[in-house]
Image: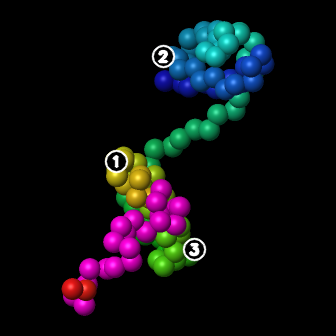
Amino acid sequence: MPIYEYRCTACRRKVTVLTLRASEAVTPVCEHCGSTRLDRLMSRFAMPRSDDARLDDLTDPSALGGLDENDPKSMARWMRKMGQELGEDAGADFDEMVDELEAGETGDDSGGETGGEDDV
C-alpha cells in the first residue's frame, strides 16, 4: 500500500495519504485545514531486513566505537539504537529508563548507597 506525503500550501503542515492501490486516483485533502492545494513531497522508503542482518549490525565492533559504558548518555543512545534495530517495543518502563539515562539521572533512589555487604 503506497503512502504519499504532501505539504499543504495553505497551512504548511505535512499530510500523509495512504492508498489501497498505486493505480488508485487520489485527490489529497489537508486533514488540518481542508485545503486541496498540496505539494507532493519525496518520501523515505523502508527496505525489509532479516533478523540476522539487524543482529549483525548490532554486534559490529565499529558500531560500538562511540560507546562509553561509564557515560549514561552514551549507554542511552546505544540502547535506543538497539531497540530500533530489533524493531520491538520494549514498553514504557524501558523508555522511561532510557529517558532518565539521557537526562543524566541514575535511577538510584537510595541517595548514592549501593546496598552492598558493607552497608548495614
Q: Which residues are magenta?
A: 99-118
Nearest to N terminus: mark 3 or mark 2: 2
**In this rendering, is residue 91 above or below 104?**
above
Q: Nearer the viewer, residue 85 or 22?
A: 85
Residue at 56% x, 76% y is 65
Mark 1 to mark 2 CA distance (whole Å): 31 Å
* Whole-percent x, y for residue 87 in the image: 40, 48
Nearest to N terminus: mark 1 or mark 2: 2
Q: Give the secondary structure at mark 2.
A: loop
**In this rendering, is residue 17 above or below 27?**
below
Nearer mark to the viewer, of 1 and 3: 1
Q: Amino acid at mark 2?
A: Leu
Can you identify the residue that label 3 sits on? 66
* Whole-percent x, y for residue 85 in the image: 44, 54
> Residue 89: in sight, yes or no?
yes
Residue at 49% x, 70% y is 72
Q: Give the secondary structure at mark 1.
A: loop
* Whole-percent x, y for residue 82 in the image: 43, 59
